[in-house]
Amino acid sequence: MIFLCSNGRERKIKNVSKYLIDWDSGCKSGIQKDVKTQIKPYWFADVVFEEFPVAGTRMSLDFYNSTQKIAIEVDGNQHYRYNQFFHSNSRQKFLHQLHRDEKKEYFCEINKIKLIRVLESDVLDSEKYPESLIKLLK
C-alpha cells in the first residue's frame, strides 16, 4: 500500500498483513476495545487494520478501513486536556501530543482518508454513544 507522506513523497507500507485486525484480540485500552466491538458488525467484511502505521512517521492509526478509506482514532482525555501524570508534568509534552494528532489529521487529509475521532468522554458519558459512532460509519 502506497501513501503520501507529509513531505509530499510517496512511501510504501510493507508487510501490511501483520496489521490486519483480529476482531477477538485485546486492545491498548478498554475504550479502544469497546469501539472495536461496536464497529465489528459494520466492518467485518471489509479490509481493516489495527495500529496501522502513518507513513513516514513512527505513529499509527488505531483502526483503518482500507475498503472504505476511513480511519478511527480513539482519544483518551490526554489528547485534549493536560494531564500531569500522562505528560510527565510537562506542558511541552502535552503540546507535542497535540502536534502528533495534527500530523495524523494531515496524513489522512492528503491521502483522502476520512478520520473519525472518538473521545473517551463520548464513550463514557454520552447517551448517544454508540449510535453517534455508527452514523459516522455509514
Image: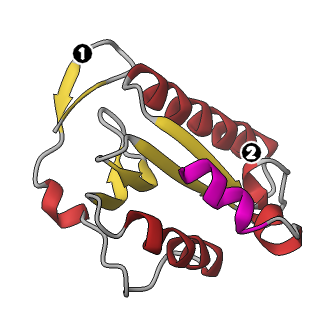
- Check disc 1 and report its element: helix, strand or loop: loop
From this view, report whether residue 124 is shown above or below residue 67: below
Q: Is any atom of residue 54 visible in this view?
A: yes
Q: How crowded is mark 1: few (under 14 residues within 10 Å), some or many (20 or more)?
A: few
Q: Nearer the viewer, residue 3 or 86?
A: 3
Marks 1/2: CA–CA distance: 28 Å
Amino acid residing under circle 1:
Arg
Residue 94 tag number: 2
Q: Mark 1 points at which residue?
A: 9
Q: Which residue is drawn at 79% across and 60% down?
A: 77
Q: Residue 70 lies in what quarter of the image? A: top left
* Start-end of magenta stretch: 129-138
Left or right of 121 on screen, residue 116: left
- Tag in front: 1 or 2: 1
The answer to which of 136 and 35 lies nearer the viewer is 136
Percent coordinates x, y for residue 84 in the rendering: 84, 60
Figure quadrant of the N terminus = top left
Relative placement, left or right, of 130 versus 134 is right
For the point 77% across and 67% down, the residue is 129
Which mark, by number, is residue 52?
A: none
Estimate the x, y position of residue 102 in percent, counting from the top left. Answer: 60, 31
Q: Judge whether 23 appears above or below 89 on screen.
A: below
Total numbered badges shown on the rendered structure: 2
Q: Nearer the viewer, residue 25 or 38?
A: 38
Image-quadrant location for residue 9: top left
Q: Is the magenta stretch mostly helix, strand or loop?
A: helix
Percent of width and height locating residue 69:
37, 40
How many other residues sit within 10 Å of disc 2, few (<14), some (14-19) or many (≥20)? many
- Tell me which amino acid carries mark 2: Phe
Question: Regarding mark 2 in the picture, which secondary structure is present there?
Answer: helix
Q: In this view, does 67 lie to the left or right of 59?
A: left
Residue at x 59%, y 77% (from the top left corner): 29
